[in-house]
Image (cartoon, helix red, strand yellow):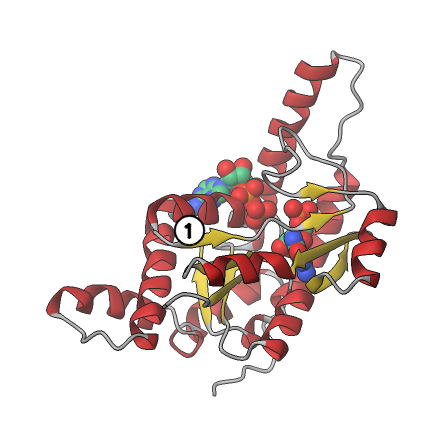
Amino acid sequence: MSGGNIFIISAPSGSGKSTLTNEVRRVVPNLEFSISYTTRPPRGSEQSGREYFFVSREEFERMLAEDEFLEYAEVFGHYYGTAKRFLREATARGHDLLLDIDVQGAAQVKQKVPAAVSVFILPPSREELERRLRRRAEADDDLQRKLLGDGARPFNTEDIIQRRLQTATREIENFSRYDYILVNDRLEQSIDVLKSIVEAERLKRSATAVTAKDEAMLAIAHGALRTQMLDQVQAILATFDLSRLPIVTE
Ligand code: ADP
Ligand code: 5GP
């Protein structure tokens, strides 16, 4: 049976990863999404069992002690982890698994499963990332007010936005550990690139012959390989003041 491939997606918070992965899950068959466990509180309209399983620190630590995680990390002061059972269950169904995890988690999975395919999503620039973080913060606060009335304490403070921008800069420094780089500029185009990466990797790992109809998809995926994206990445790094970062070309 085919399946059992792991696709890791990492991105600085606010670059559009959830939007993008939700779309790709809708259009790519046999691709399951691992719902992570987290100790952070739900945001906006998030529901336990849909975006995350929201659990207490005690529950998370119990799962850790029982070795239930494929990987875990502490991000923004909260635990986040991928339960091993998601990979077990997807593999048993002959499906692939998509992991939306941070750079620390991605490194752990790559170490345990070297064949995992990793994709790093970049925003077009620091300015655009800040705009998206603010837009999302406003939308979440509006919803919070609707639910709790005008006395609701805004969930997204300026502090959180600034902290996420600083963390973004640190995370982006790790882009060269990833196989593919996807610049999330126009959403439709980004969906097409992510879908092509999944299909190209599946084709590579199957015994199926390449047909003329695969050529366009393979070309799109090839164009997103990190080694093909270095000039574009340099331009984006410059907006984060990271232009002097050593670039790995291999
Ligand atoms: P992440 O999951 O990376 O934290 P989200 O998917 O929540 O980010 O997106 C952050 C904000 O940016 C949301 O308001 C979303 O609608 C918006 N967004 C996502 N992708 C794009 C895009 N390609 N162009 C413009 N806005 C986008
Ligand atoms: P958010 O709180 O914005 O949903 O996610 C914050 C960060 O945690 C993101 O970078 C996201 O990819 C990461 N994350 C979510 N789930 C997991 C997980 O299970 N493991 C790890 N290592 N990171 C995760």
**Would you say residue 42 is visible in this rendering?**
yes
Going 47% across and 88% down the picture, which residue do you hit?
250
How would you rate the neighbour count of disc 1 (Cα within 10 Å): few for under 14, some for 14-19, many for 20 or more? some
Most extreme residue toward the top, as rendered?
149
**In the picture shown, does residue 89 fall above or below 4?**
above
Q: Observer-nearest residue: 107 or 184?
A: 107
Question: Is label 1 within 8 A of ligand 1 (CB to nearest ligand atom)?
Answer: yes
Quadrant occupied by the N terminus: bottom left
Most extreme residue toward the right, as rendered?
58
Residue 49 place in picture, x, y as percent: 62, 39
Going 41% across and 61% down the picture, which residue do you hit?
94
**In the picture shown, does residue 114 fall above or below 174?**
below
Count all numbered tags in the image, as a single digit. 1
Residue 127 place in picture, x, y as percent: 57, 49
Quadrant location of residue 95? bottom left
Going 51% across and 54% down the picture, which residue do you hit?
123
Residue 211 place in picture, x, y as percent: 14, 70
Q: Observer-nearest residue: 90 or 172?
A: 90
Q: Is mark 1 on a helix, strand or loop?
A: loop
139 displayed left or right of 196: right
Residue occupied by mark 1: 185
Most extreme residue toward the left, as rendered?
212
Quadrant location of residue 106? bottom right
**Amino acid marked by disc 1:** Asp
132 displayed left or right of 67: left
**Would you say residue 223 is visible in this rendering?**
no
Residue 98 place in picture, x, y as percent: 50, 57
Q: Observer-nearest residue: 92 or 113?
A: 92
Going 79% across and 56% down the picture, which residue do you hit?
63
